[in-house]
Image (cartoon, rainbow, N blue to C red):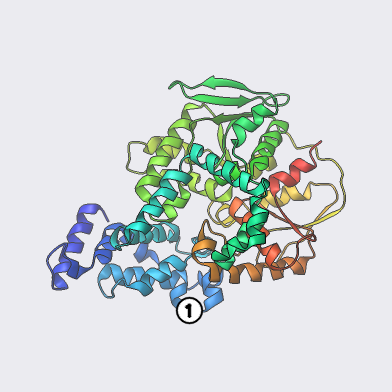
Amino acid sequence: MNAANANTHANTRAKEDGGAPGTASAGRLEQALRLALDEDALERCMRCGFCQSACPTFRVTGLEAASPRGRIALMKAAYDGFMAADSDFVGQMELCLGCRACEPACPAGVPYGRLIEQAREAIAKGRKQPLRARLAGKILMEGVIARHGVLRGAGRVLRLYQRSGLRAAAHRLGVLRALPPHVREMEASLPEASGRGVIREWLRRGLPARWETDDQGRRLLVVPAEGERAARVGMFRGCVMDVLFLSTNVNTIRLLRAAGFEVVIPEGQKCCGALHAHAGRSAFARRLAADNAAVFRAAGVDWVVSNAGGCGAHLKEYDHVLHGTPSADDGAWLSSRVKDVSELLAESGRPLRLANGAPLVATCQDSCHLRNVMRVKRQPRELMQRVPGLVLREMRDADLCCGSAGIYNVLQPEMSAALLDRKMEQVKATGADVVVTANPGCLLQMRWGIRRAGLEGRVKAVHLVDLLAERLE
């Protein structure tokens, strides 16, 4: 439904509800929902229920309203004016992990991910929040996460806290007791931060690289392939990856070089915008997408590679994000060229030469967006099985969300912990030494889960890239 029709629909419904168009009697949130929600997508749901067994929150609660089908029914009822979009409605929209496991299970092809983002956009616009909460959200989302320089600065502060003795002192003096228990547990599970970023780190190590500029004068760091070049790929460095998992970014370049890829890292790339879109900040997410699509297209790359499932999935949907905007062509171009690093390493370039090592039992925890949006499941497992001495044992429900889901584990700690505890029981059952995943949020969640389950020293959580790089000849 276009904006004009949506406005007409909203005004008509407002009159039917006894108020003038646009007045508070119709409800700000209800009107925002009528403007935001895609009516055709709402109508596509057949109420068959195939989505329920795939939905983590339904499996924990057993509640219809906590399933994709139930949430769509709530959206439809609010859209049609048959129910108020009250706090219970908002609560169910926020309880959704956005893992999108329902989409592969849906025979009607309902774009549930888009619907939940539209609903959250309406909630962000239509529900009045305290000024302090609005400012905090804006500063965090637009002033920190979206700005690489600020985020790296935060990484330097975190690194100082971790290495200077302040962290130990804070634990010893009980300063962290002021924080919620789940935040304290996650703080203890954080890896060592960095404020350098992958470009500075690569150059600091004196590894092969050169600078180029695109036709707009923007700088690109170009890392040559080892041997004959198979393709030129642009590397998306991410936000959390570049601060908390810097070594994984460096190892990504090492693996791509070894496989014959020339790696290009545009200095002007931004945050992908996934967290902003999931939080209902769609306009800002579109700005980030437009900048990224233009930067990578100007870099003259064959593929755009990501090592974070959540980022890759959002990049893959830039055609939808930028549809109807002046950047639509750039968005479609980038969407058609996004690959997860496991896809490139498993299917293109030269096979990696991996050395023998100690015997290892590993299990794979799927990144939800990598599996459900990018539809990448086979390639990580194929690469793991190429590691000499590694035995892969599949865990039960490897495709079920671990409870990370961006910042869900902070906003919805009870549901997140319930899912994580179930996940760790499945990990224990495999007898694995290592849990392998391909997304920073999943890695942090697995580290938290290992700590909660008392498995420290027995089980590690690692990124697929680091597992392969450790065995690279």
Residue 369 at what x, y percent from top left? 55, 54
Which residue appears farthest toward the bottom when viewing the image?
62
Residue 104 at what x, y percent from top left? 53, 60
The residue tagged 1 is: 63
Q: In which image quadrant can residue 176 be found?
A: bottom right
Q: Is residue 122 left or right of residue 185?
A: left
Q: Residue at (69%, 44%) from the top-left corner?
A: 465
Q: Is residue 119 left or right of residue 299?
A: left
Quadrant for the N terminus in the image: bottom left
Q: Residue at (87%, 53%) from the top-left corner?
A: 359
For the residue pair 200 and 420, the one nearer the viewer reads as 200
Residue 103 at what x, y percent from top left? 50, 61
Q: Is residue 247 visible?
A: yes
Q: In which image quadrant can residue 455 be found?
A: bottom right
Quadrant for the C terminus in the image: top right
Residue 213 vs 263, above or below: the answer is above
The residue carrying pointer 1 sits among few (fewer than 14), some (14 to 19) or many (20 or more) residues within 10 Å by Cα, namely few
Q: Is residue 76 left or right of residue 289?
A: left
Residue 203 vs 140, above or below: the answer is above
Residue 163 at what x, y percent from top left? 67, 46
